[in-house]
Amino acid sequence: MNFLELFFFPFLIGIIGGFSAIGIREIIGFSDRLSFAGYYFLEIPVVFMATAYIIHNFLKNTSNPTIEIVSKQIILKKGDLDYKKGLAAAVLTAFNIGMGTPVGREGPIAKLGGALSRLFLKLFNTKGHLIPLYVTCGVTSALAATFNAPIAAIVFGLEIVIGKINLSIITPLAISSMTATIISREFLGDYPTFFVHHLGYDEKLLFLIPVFAFAFALLVTVFEFITKELEIKFQKIHYLKKALIAGIAVGALITIFPQCASLGYNQVTSLFAQHFGAIHALSLSFVKLLVLSITLAAGIFGGVFAPGVFIGAFFGYFIGRMFFSPSQALSVALIGTVAFTSGISKAPFRSTLIIIELTKNYQLTIPALLTSVLSVYLNNLFQNRFHFLRAVLQKGFDLSNENFKRNMEELDIKGFLKEVYVIDKNAIISEILPALINSNSYYFPVVDDNKLIGVISFRDIRAAKNLNIKAKEIMTPNPEKIKINDSIIKVFEIMPHISANLIPVVDEKNNYIAMFDIEKFKKVASVIYIES
């Protein structure tokens, strides 16, 4: 990459991202001034119906552009985002937030930053392989400006979208995110999204982390269950009627509990100023959870990070009060913001870093990260969900697509077997080298009485001090393997952890059978993915 590609284009994209965030805030402020606070029971149904009409009649794709959806589109579509929908979704959501809709702004802002960056790249006829990176720069710069958290935004790009780290990736992400943050601070000030004073913790909190993780994992599971059940029920109803019913329900609830309207960051700040009691905090967390579920299930656009912060903080404060004083319970509230947003996004490191960078409470990094990691693990366990979904997505396959998953499960391991040269553990490398060179493989099984004990690649051979040694001395022992009767989904679990294009296949007694051909598998899976 030359200077223009590494520095100048990311700088321009950072400007786009910075002003995207500022523009969205201005729209929210404008619609907030138009809103009749306290009359949500009249206002929200109208907003929901108008939004539903616009989405169904003017936007091709009715899926909600959350951060996770945007990142998935960048990966699967190689950064080819629809800038028209990005602009429309961002403006629509920003207007709705100002009117009181209980969603977050980060998803639409990410969509807008990425979509406008894609439009910018079209003007310059950018090289195809750089498009996903630059679109990610647009997304991360918009998020950096929104949260005033450039480091967390960079990590988002690395962890969620790109999935790998090197200088040619980190540099553009850093340039664009820093540029956007500088612009945001110049126009909006260097202020956190919500204010939290310096918090601490003691050993008791560390011992209670499994309890907190279980509670937040359960809360995320409840949220996802309610949202999914409501989506199923709403599918049978005309979209305008659905919007009206959802609008009446949400409008009524936030009229009774106005703290649950819009983003809720001011209320989170009030919580950390100890302006709420434990029971009041619990009730607000569940009301916010319910109105968010109804809103998303009705197909209304909006992010989930801001409401996730609200739900996690208020529920965390309630849980904390069961074990600690009010001031100490605030540490659990902050951990709750991380744990709940991690559970929703399935990205514990990114969520932890955003919250810690926002609040400058770096001393809570360890308990927050531990709780969020354990919470995400438990949430996947509760719902019998694959923990490797994100890693597989970065390979270009979306296992959350039920049709694709179901069609893949019909395939048999036996259909992808490939015969390669088999090495005995006592074989001398110099003696078998001609056979390895003439083989159509780079990767070979090592056996002992036909039992698989290791693998050898030409990389292992390069690392050998000499070639007059036995195979067992340079092999990689206990390699990843699959059993002949395993589900084909097992291959997806292993793929992100290996660089080879072959996986050893064994029977139930670890007898070597053949190699599984990953390249052939990916070709077949690609065709099935398109048909799904």
Image: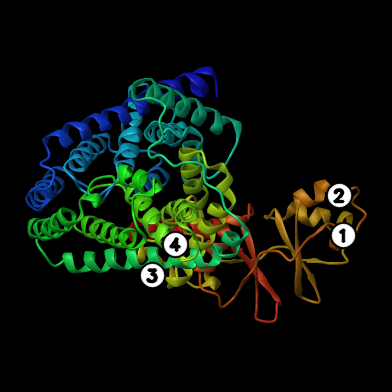
Marks 1 and 4: which is nearer the front?
4
Measuring from the top left, give residue 105's x and y in whole percent. 29, 41
What amino acid type should be assigned to the residue bearing mark 2?
Ala
Q: Which residue is mark 4?
A: 321
Disc 1 from disc 4: Cα separation: 58 Å
Element type at mark 2: loop
Quadrant including the C terminus: bottom left
The answer to whether 497 is drawn above or below residue 356 in the figure is below
Gap between marks 1 and 2, in whole Å? 9 Å
Disc 3 target residue? 406
Mark drawn on residue 370: none
**Dot label at residue 473:** 1
Q: Are marks 1 and 3 in contact (CB under 8 Å)?
A: no
Between disc 1 and disc 3, whose residue precedes?
Answer: 3
Contact between labelled residues 2 and 1, with CB atoms less than 8 Å apart: yes
Quarter of the rendering containing residue 239: bottom left
Q: Earlier in the sequence, mark 4 or mark 3?
A: 4
Q: CA distance from mark 2 to mark 3?
A: 44 Å
Contact flag, marks 4 and 3 (Cβ < 8 Å): no
Residue 519, visible in the rendered structure: yes
138 vs 465: above or below? above
Circle nearer the N terminus (2, 3)? 3
- Whether tag 1 and tag 4 are in contact, CB under 8 A, the answer is no
Which quadrant, please, contains the N terminus? top right
Q: Residue at x 40, y 21 (%)?
A: 12
Disc 4 to disc 2, how far (Cα)? 60 Å
Closer mark to the observer between disc 4 and disc 2: 4
Q: Which residue is mark 2?
A: 464
Q: Position of residue 64 (x, y in %)?
A: 26, 50
Q: Nearer the viewer, residue 326 or 303?
A: 326
